[in-house]
Image (cartoon, rainbow, N blue to C red):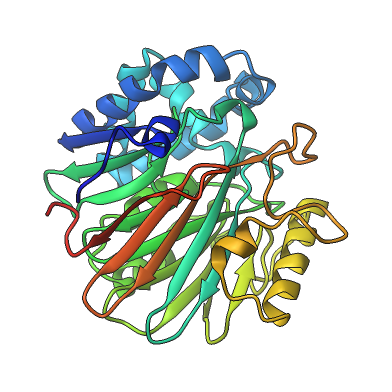
Amino acid sequence: MSIDLSSPVARRLGWLDAAGSHYEIGLALGRRGQRAVHERLLDSEMWRTITHQRHALTVARMLATTRERLPWVVEELEGLAAGLELPLETIFAWNCRGDLLANCPDGCTTVILPGETPCIAHNEDGLPCLDGEAFLARVRPDDQPGFLAFCYPGSIPGHTFVLTEAGIVQTVNNLRLTGVVPELPRMVLARAMLAQPDLAAIEALLAAAPVGGGFHFTLAQQGLAEVLSLEVGGGRVSRRRIEAASVHANHALHLVAAQIVTDSSADRQRRGEALLAGGECDPLAILGDSGGAGLPIYRREADDPDHENTLATGVFRLLNDGIHWEVHAPGDRRPYHGTCYTLFD
């Protein structure tokens, strides 16, 4: 995979190569994000809320469950904490933010275009203070498939948009479920999904997982025609095969669960569906749209009511002989791009 690291989008989004043991990978991710975490996150209200002592018992319970079921993810988190020069319990809590708070500011919109060569496109919406601080990482664990992921400083990979060496595309949307008593963090589960060889293994992992917060996963694998919508949370999994062009914002569409639906999520869902119904088939046009009567799909306003901005856009086209991918920085249609026959060619 050839990347021009001198291009404007590369300078805007940044790049990391990380390989080795899970601790070594976490350490590299931590060092890459250390400055942003210390300068942008530690003094934020969200960081103070998530890492408050009132969550300590819940965090300890989830850490114990993760050690028991997915010890290699804990190793990655230990490396992440070391690279960030912060306590493991603090970093683990930050990676449980969507389990500790129902209304966590993790946004996103996904456009799904099924067919013979499916396309999955995704706006990654996150904290505005991390604009320009997030990065792409090519990660090569010693014992698992490698992957390309959009990463946030201070967070393990898996909960944004990812392409794995197994030919799996995974994009993730926050679901704001209420009444959940979490046992396993949803971000830990999303990270574990990247180690799976196929969609069947991912579905089995999700079905057997303990209770966690809510996520929507759009999943496809090169060589397979189906595109899956999986809504997960509160110990339940709802599965739909996507048969027609669709959009997904930040609320459950088929999982039966109590949830918070923000104005932004409802407006983005409604606007995306209207654009598709009107014949728009360019995923970048949909994800870059700022029209409509409500709050926009493309989010760059300082006063966004969910405290989120669009930080990157990923587009993945599953071809017969590989996966063409591109990643755009906000306002720049010149992307990182490539066709992946393997992540390591």
Percent x, y of residue 172: 51, 56
| Residue at the spot 17% in from the left edge and 52% down from the top edge | 144
Please identify the quarter of the rendering in which residue 153 is found.
top left
Residue 322 visible here: yes
Residue 298 in the figure: left or right of residue 142: right
| Residue at the spot 39% in from the left edge and 55% down from the top edge | 326
| Residue at the spot 65% in from the left edge and 40% down from the top edge | 309
Residue 75 in the figure: left or right of residue 281: left
Residue 203 visible here: no
Residue 78 in the figure: left or right of residue 287: left
Q: Is residue 111 above or below residue 146?
A: below
Please state which of residues 286 and 58 is positioned toward the viewer in this rendering. 286
Q: Is residue 303 above or below residue 222?
A: above
Percent x, y of residue 193: 34, 57
Please state which of residues 335 and 216 is positioned toward the viewer in this rendering. 335
Please identify the quarter of the rendering in which residue 83 is found.
top left
Percent x, y of residue 97: 57, 36
Looking at the rendered image, the quarter that the C terminus falls into is: bottom left
Percent x, y of residue 137: 31, 40
Q: How many marks?
A: 0
